[in-house]
Amino acid sequence: MVFESLVADLLNRFLGDFVDNLDASQLNIGIWGGDVKLENLEVKETALDDLDLPVKLKFGYLSNLVLKIPWKSLYTEPVIANVEGLHLIVVPNKGVVYNEEKALKNEQDAKQKALLRLEENRKKRRSNSLIF
């Protein structure tokens, strides 16, 4: 039970902006399989605010969230999140104003991240080819 509460605290830090308080009773953890299953989560009304969408979230519900965590190779393998049963009730948000500067910055940031990933992959391939 202690492990579950530690995982719940950790998940609250990362998912806290999107879902209401997680507790250990919502967790189903397969330690060696690497699956953390969360059920019946309520999505916060503020979950979509940072996206500057022309809609406002009134109610959100998530049936299942499964996180596949490779405990044995946490730093080298990806954590995969599988979302099932996401239901959102949204209404028009007339207060959203299109911010071209922010949109351009987000686009530029995405391009820079893609370039960084490509460069890292190129370096990895180059170092791997030198090893063999």
Image: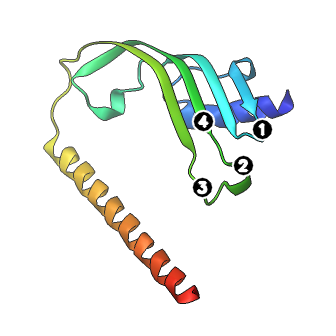
Give the amino acid at mark 4.
Leu
Q: Residue at x 65, y 43 (%)?
A: 69
Q: Are marks 2 and 3 in contact (CB under 8 Å)?
A: no
Give the crowd class for mark 1: few <14, some 14-19, many >=20 residues within 10 Å: few
Give the structural element (helix, strand or loop) at label 3. Answer: loop
Q: Which mark is residue 67?
A: 4
Give the structural element (helix, strand or loop) at label 1. Answer: loop
Q: Which residue is mark 2?
A: 71
Specify which label sits upstream in the sequence, 2 or 1.
1
Quadrant showing the C terminus: bottom right
Specify which label sits upstream in the sequence, 4 or 1.
1
In the drawing, does residue 21 fall left or right of residue 28? left
The picture places residue 52, in percent across and down from the top left corner, at 26, 31
Q: In 3D space, how far apart are the residues under numbered discs 2 and 1 (Cα atoms)?
A: 8 Å
Give the structural element (helix, strand or loop) at label 4. Answer: strand
Give the amino acid at mark 3.
Glu
Total labels: the figure holds 4
63 or 93, which lies in front? 63
Quadrant showing the N terminus: top right
The picture places residue 64, in percent across and down from the top left corner, at 56, 21
The picture places residue 109, in percent across and down from the top left corner, at 30, 56
Q: Which residue is mark 1?
A: 31
Q: In 3D space, how far apart are the residues under numbered discs 2 and 4 (Cα atoms)?
A: 11 Å
Give the amino acid at mark 1.
Ile
